Amino acid sequence: MKSPSIYLLILLLFSAALFAQSKVSGIVVDDNNEPIPFANVYFKNSSEGVITNENGKFYLESAKSHPILVVSFIGYTPQEINLTKAVTYNLKVQLVEGETLREVVLVSGKLSKKNNPAIDILRKIWARKRMNGLRQFDQYQYDKYEKIEFDLNTIDSTTMKSKLFKGMEFVFEQMDTSAITGKTYLPIFINEAISEVFGNNVINKEKEIIKANKNSGFNNNQQVITFVKELYSEYDIYDNYLKFFAKDFVSPLSRTGIDVYNYALVDSMFIDKKWCYNIVYYPRRKGELTFKGDFWVNDTTFAVKSIKMGVTKSANINWVKEIYIEQDFDVVNDSVFLLKRDHMMSDFAFNKKEESQGVYGKRTTLYKNHQFNQEKPKEFYKEEINFIDNAVYNQPDDYWAENRFESLSKDELGVYKMLDTLQTVKKFKQMYSLVTILGSGYVEMNNFDFGPIFSTVGYSDVEGLRLRVGGRTYFGRNDPWRLQGYTAYGFKDNQVKYGLSGKILLNPKNRLILEGGNRRDIEQIGANLTTTNNVLGRSFASTGLFMSGSNTNLTSINLSTLSANIEPIKNVTFEAGISYRTLKSASDTFSLDYYTDASQTTIQSEVKQSEMSFSIDYTPGRKTYGYGVERGIVDSPYSRFFVSYSNGYKGVLDSDFDYQKLQIYLKQPVLVGGFGRLNIITEAGKTFGAVPLGLLSVIPGNQSYFIIDNTFNNLNFYEFVSDEYATFQLEHHFLGRLFSRIPGVRKLNLREIVSIRTVVGDVSAENRQLNASTLNYLAPTKPYWEYGFGIGNIFKVFRLDCTWRGNYRDLPGTNNFTVKGSFGFYF
């Protein structure tokens, strides 16, 4: 850690003497001066303690005064250190190998799964876990208070004097010291919420009613509020796996825990008049998603009284240096232990070095006023589709002072005032605008956003260099209507393109939305199977800057749409719409020509088509934020089932064809415990009636050097066409499970991905007879398939996939092997 200024050091020591009766930090080593990781450090005759990290370092703080610190580890003689001062930093404790002197018998040496009293207790926890806590009752309800805070940590004199904070030095008046790490931090955001929770274990339903919500500086920003809530999703320590940051961590109480953890029984004592055992646990291997820590468990109910969990620094997770969890349970009676306090802290940083600066994300949740077996009707648990009570976000200060479960500290109260002041500082507003631009892709200017800026420059073999400018109306996150549009110009084809759309929310309760628009542009329609009438939708394959092979198979499209959609049930959306489009080739080397007569003497080059469509989109588990005509989607895995039926009408607006088209799309993410995440995607469709190439289903190829979802990496554009098809994709992310077992490789924190994709389809004889294009129809009547292996998390932001073609390897111009990549930020 960088040395703070003398003033800051004096200030911190003075604060320590005032607000914490015992503070101690240091390192635990063996008789060879080698650090001892996962050693047990605690204040004597108390349940307050910590486990040393991988480097043998620890920090322990208590609001009480403790004269003796005890340090112990398996196979070493415990040491008791007299603490003569309230604050003792940089303590070095050397343990010597020998027999333990503790009252409880320990397992020495490498911890075994057999004849281990800790594991005997663990098995009793498994047997009783379904009878602990809220699970014992048919119905339950309680009051809940939640506080989420973000803090800039590891503040030193260099940080305080940096140009970044010039003109904003007043923010350092709110600095504090972490009771968990001992590092200085500066609170920069606080969100508080008070709610009532109702649950029914019989029908497995739960409902939370928010009574008040308040945060510093972002009172009406639902995006920020939803983000911080989703960052710390609910979890149950009795579950086998705990989900944090879209990853499954093995719970120390998991039935599979004995395969990944060492357990040791180290102590026993009375806590709240209940005799409890203390069990220390730590990982058997590095690089896995595991914790270190200890828990106290009752000797009769085998319910956990308290638990501490810290994610090891070697865990394969990005941007998070540390995760620390504390849970305390209240003894209601001899058989009921209920969670009363839950605290979780994450240290977000660009790297995991001890001295690196970062941001603490802390959530503290308190529970009280439990009531049981008061049944409510099933209709009570029905989810609201689109409800917001603005009064919830505007409760007065008197309400909070009276209803908070615990008072805010002086520094936490000061953050509200500090953030209000900070938002008036010009430099802060400039920094906030920059972050907003990078996050949304839009530049905000007086109720109109210019963008998205990432689509400004493009290239294709037909358009050459393409420049695009566009924007949207934006009065706030919950706008009831929105207009957006763009114009683009290609320097090779010398053509101006444009798109314009508008939508309005007619009924907020069931989200009845009317929308329409028109687009005239050039695009690659052979880059996706399941289609929608999103008038401004456009595939990256249309104007990718980096493409392999020729990309002249582009189509000039003029599309007009009008539709209405409604969400009568949460996450179930119905849409009905009409559209009219014209299609023609955008290149002299590519043709959409078709015969207009059975004798194949008359050729038409342009398709004119009117269409009516109806679709159902079911997205169970999807979470959204915002209440306007456009909502944001929380970035977490959710299932999706989409079905669309379209009908083309010949003669309507001079339309050319009668046909019916049915399309189905299914995506199912599966979290496979400690073995990662499996994504299953299938698409199927059929066109009834004779249609030309422009209206057929083209099996999506990928000629980009980058990964494009739902495409086949080794197929070229228009390599396969069909009027009936079925695809199946499997992609499994092991999240480093295999690489973590390889010495030397595990330090790179790489992640493995394996995939297989297949498609089968056909083209009818009548559709082949219509074909007058330069393309000979080839359908994958024998299933085409390809398989791949990828390495993710390269430098934390890059993924590289190698894909092999399984068959159809002898066709002209085939890609039997490809390498493609993608960029992204992942935990």
Image (cartoon, rainbow, N blue to C red):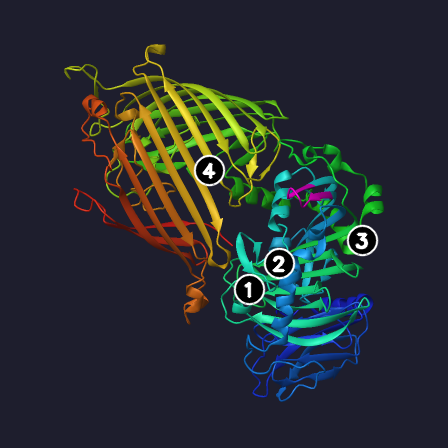
Let me know if residue 161 appears in the view.
no
Q: Return the mark for residue 290.
A: 1
Q: Are marks 4 and 1 in contact (CB under 8 Å)?
A: no
Determine whether the residue tagged by mark 4 lies in a helix, strand or loop. helix
Residues drawn in magenta: 197-207
Residue drawn at 46 percent across, 26 percent down = 615
Q: How far apart are marks 3 and 2 (CA)?
A: 21 Å
Closest to the observer, 12 or 641:
641
Q: Which of marks 4 and 2 is in front?
A: 2
Closest to the observer, 418 or 138:
138
Q: Which of marks 2 and 1 is in front?
A: 1
- In the image, what residue type sits under mark 1? Thr
Q: Name the residue under label 2.
A: 346
Left or right of 94? Residue 442 is left
Determine whether the residue tagged by mark 3 lies in a helix, strand or loop. loop
Q: Name the residue under label 4.
A: 453
Residue 710 lies, with reference to residue 486, above or below; the image says below
The reply to whether the magenta stretch includes residue 205 is: yes
Mark with earlier residue (3, 2): 2
Q: Are marks 3 and 2 in contact (CB under 8 Å)?
A: no
Residue 800 lies, with reference to residue 554, above or below; the image says below
- In the image, what residue type sits under mark 2? Ser
Q: How far apart are marks 4 and 2 (CA)?
A: 32 Å
Determine whether the residue tagged by mark 1 lies in a helix, strand or loop. loop
Magenta: main secondary structure: strand
Residue drawn at 52 percent across, 64 percent down = 315
Determine whether the residue tagged by mark 2 lies in a helix, strand or loop. strand
Q: Nearer the viewer, mark 4 or mark 1?
A: 1
- In the image, what residue type sits under mark 4? Ile
Give the image location of residue 528, x and y in percent: 35, 35
Residue 632 lies, with reference to residue 104, above or below; the image says above
Q: Which of marks 3 and 1 is in front?
A: 1
